[in-house]
Image (cartoon, rainbow, N blue to C red):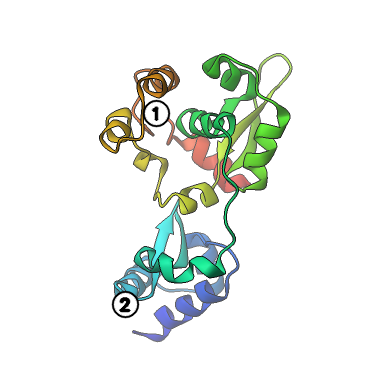
Amino acid sequence: MDDFARAIEAILFASEEPLSLEDIAAHAGEGDVAAALETLAAHYDGRGIELVERGKRWHFQTAPDLAHHLRREREEPRRLSRAATETLAIIAYHEPVSRAEIEAIRGVQISKGTLDVLMEAGWVKTGKRRETPGRPLTYLTTTDFLTHFGLETRRDLPGIEDLKAAGLLDPLDEEALQLSLGDDEPGDEYEDEEVETERESD
């Protein structure tokens, strides 16, 4: 491993949050950042900690197969209500999406507390306002959402058939999710430049 790769290793290790290629280059100076990251990822492959990319940002994490050793040290996450789970799914599959659009898809109003819970968890953030009457806020998922659920991009979100095969969807849930997704597959039309620009600007 050369000195440039070691410098990037130190930068990522010391960072409190995942870093983009641009962030890393700003600290590391001139050099092939992408090649150095590949070297580091290969170096840590199969070890107790791994170098991973989530949402075009890089960070170290503990190996997933060792999670049971750390369970006592981790705070138990608060279980999401059904309303919060449905709202999170709608935002993930349809972002950027306004509150009114979320309510139209769910067929019921959502309380402010539901969005607050998702934002406090760090999984949802506000995006740009719609250029429509009232200029409503839109909502997006965050890099923390991708990291928590082990997704590289939103294209990795499961489709209905994946959920059924895993036994995670009952008939009523399937009908509701089908209405939510329409004819779209996860990420087919939402990983566009506008969404990426909104992510980078936050």
Q: Quadrant of residue 130?
A: top right
Q: Amino acid at mark 1?
A: Glu
Q: Which residue is nearer to you in this view: 53 or 24? A: 53
Going 48% across and 81% down the picture, which residue do you hit?
A: 7
Residue at 52%, 62% (x, y): give it. 19
Residue 182 seen in this snapshot: yes
State the quadrant of the N terminus. Answer: bottom left
Residue 92, position in %: x, y? 49, 35
Name the residue tied to disc 1.
189
Residue 99 appears in which quarter of the rendering? Answer: top right
Q: Left or right of 155: which side holds 72? A: right
- The Cα–Cα distance between marks 1 and 2, rounded to whole angstroms, is 35 Å
Nearest to the observer: residue 92 or residue 4? 92
Query: Which of the two discs, 1 and 2, sits closer to the camera?
Result: 2
Q: Residue at x 34, y 65 (%)?
A: 65
Q: Amino acid at mark 2?
A: His
- The 10 Å Cα crowd at callout 2, few under 14, some 14 to 19, many 20 or more, is few
| Mark 1 vs 2, N-terminal side | 2
Residue 136, x across and y down, in percent: 69, 23
Pointers 1 and 2 in contact (CB under 8 A)? no
User: Height in image: 81 above or below 180?
Assistant: below
Read off the residue under disc 2.
Answer: 43
Which element is circle 2 on? helix
Label 1: element kind: loop
